[in-house]
Image (cartoon, rainbow, N blue to C red):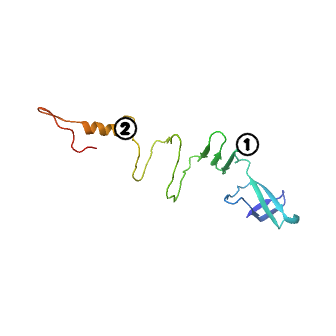
Amino acid sequence: KIQVALGPYDGVDHLKRLAEFGFASSPPEGSDVLAVFIAGDVSNGVIVATGHQASRLKNLKPGEAAIYDVLGRSIWLTKDNGIVIEAKDDNVTVNNAKTVTINASDEIVFNTPKLTVNGDIEATGDVKDVVRAMAADRGIYNGHTHPVSGGDTEVPNQQE
């Protein structure tokens, strides 16, 4: 329920607010509201729409949609740039997911100074760094010998 000012000297306390199913918000103070009063009775009204002009995303193209808050965080379904999540330096957390699957047709890029994984890492393909791939390291190890007097040792009997 929301308190609404109907004019400079008139207001309504505890006005019910309807919102689309699956969406919840608490409009900040100073928001615009559209209220409907049944038969003109201010004691029997409901808010059917709210807006906050200072916070809303601007310049959306026809067909685009977004959810946003007063802090500038948003999820924007853009026409040209896919889906853009603006976290405004806040954390983004996925809780209680049994499995999180990302299906990318080209690649996934992490631009971060540090990547931490708490648990095992498994790869079905090769793993490489700026020097070479792990498969290349295995080849070097598996074929290496050590110099000894009179020649070299055999290659390791325990291959990687």
Residue at the (69%, 45%) spot, across then down:
64
- Residue that protrudes farthest toward the left in the picture: 150
Figure quadrant of the N terminus = bottom right
> In this orientation, which residue lies closer to the viewer: 16 or 10?
16
Residue at the (28%, 36%) spot, across then down:
140
**Location of residue 63 by image quarter:** top right
- Residue that protrudes farthest toward the top in the picture: 150
Residue 52 is left or right of residue 123, and the answer is right
Residue 44 in percent (x, y) is at: 82, 67
Residue 10 in percent (x, y) is at: 84, 61
Crowd rating for badge 2 (residues with CA inside 10 Å; few <14, some 14–19, many 20+)? few
> In this orientation, which residue lies closer to the viewer: 51 or 124?
124
The residue labelled by disc 1 is: 62
The residue labelled by disc 2 is: 133
Q: Answer whether residue 72 is visible to the viewer in this image.
A: no
Amino acid type shown at disc 2: Ala
Mark 2–mark 1 distance (CA, rounded to whole Å): 46 Å
- Residue that protrudes farthest toward the bottom in the picture: 43
Earlier-in-chain disc, 2 versus 1: 1
**Location of residue 152 by image quarter:** top left
Q: Secondary structure at mark 1?
A: loop
